[in-house]
Amino acid sequence: AQSVTQPDIHITVSEGASLELRCNYSYGATPYLFWYVQSPGQGLQLLLKYFSGDTLVQGIKGFEAEFKRSQSSFNLRKPSVHWSDAAEYFCAVGALGGFKTIFGAGTRLFVKA
Amino acid sequence: KAGVTQTPRYLIKTRGQQVTLSCSPISGHRSVSWYQQTPGQGLQFLFEYFSETQRNKGNFPGRFSGRQFSNSRSEMNVSTLELGDSALYLCASMGTGNTIYFGEGSWLTVV
């Protein structure tokens, strides 16, 4: 079955600390992988995406993610978190050919001063 | 290039009424998807349209319907509104590499 799992419902980190948000997927086709961020009351904004090639991808706002095929994972990282990064983060997986894009349940990030 | 535009942004309806939400995708995008987002259920896929045809469908009752026009603009309709339909409805259009771009959403409150 196709699925995306974000194991952490919420995470709290101190400002300036590093961040890693986990994402695991199960998908029948060759996956395209995405991370989105949603601030309260807003739509989802694309942070980064992976299609092929270098398994470490850079995104906006200083985020990066690493694709590990053997672990079916696509974890999001940031070396130093800012208070403005507090938001909800969604991992998603899709594929070509009309396959439906599937979203994880989201991880809410809290940043403490 | 303009992003995905959704109208209206906020609306309040009464139980039993129906509502129509509109979405204009990014220029050149032919695929439009709709999602319902609620605090309890998270982001749930409603349906996807591609070139005026429904290509994928989620697990929602028949009260939820949609359509896409020849200019790729899309509408979704919810009939016989229930309190549980209160949610943020997100429209998204799909670009190259199946990358999805979201609008700001339409907040629907059913009273």
Image: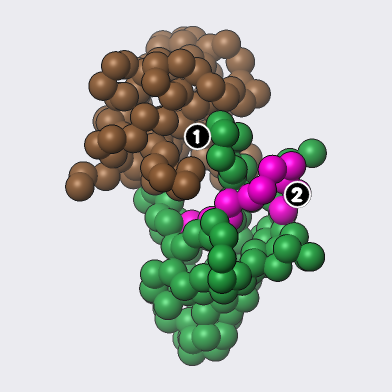
Chain colours: A green, B brown
**Dominant secondary structure (helix, strand or loop) of the stretch shown in magenta:** strand
Please state the horizontal and vertical placement of residue A16, each as a whole percent of the image.
49, 89
Name the front one of labels 2 and 1.
Answer: 2
Marked residue chain, label 1: B
Tell me the residue at 56%/31% (across/down): A98
Image x and y of residue B90, in percent:
42, 37
- In the rendered image, the residue lying farthest to the front is A53
Outermost residue toward the bottom in this view: A16
Q: Secondary structure at mark 1?
A: strand
Q: Which chain letter matches label 2?
A: A
Span of residues in magenta: A25-37
Q: Which mark is residue A26?
A: 2
Q: Is residue B14 visible?
A: no
- Distance from disc 2 to disc 1, alpha carbons, whole Å, reads 21 Å
Q: Position of residue B70 (x, y in %)?
A: 29, 16
Q: Residue at x 37, y 50 (%)?
A: A42
Are the residues under marks 2 and 1 on the same chain?
A: no
Q: Is label 2 in a helix, a strand or a loop?
A: strand
Amino acid type of the residue that numbered disc 1 sits on in the rendered structure: Tyr
Q: Which mark is residue B52?
A: none
The residue lying toward the viewer, choosing from A38 and A1, is: A1
* Residue B110: image location, x then y, percent: 44, 25
Disc 1 packing (10 Å; few <14; some 14–19; many ≥20): many
User: Is B50 rendered above or below residue B65?
Assistant: below
In the displayed structure, would residue A21 be above or below residue B20? below
**Position above or below: B64 against B26:** above
In the image, is residue A76 part of the stretch drawn in magenta? no
Q: Which mark is residue B35?
A: 1
Task: Name the residue: 61% across, 15% down.
Answer: B61
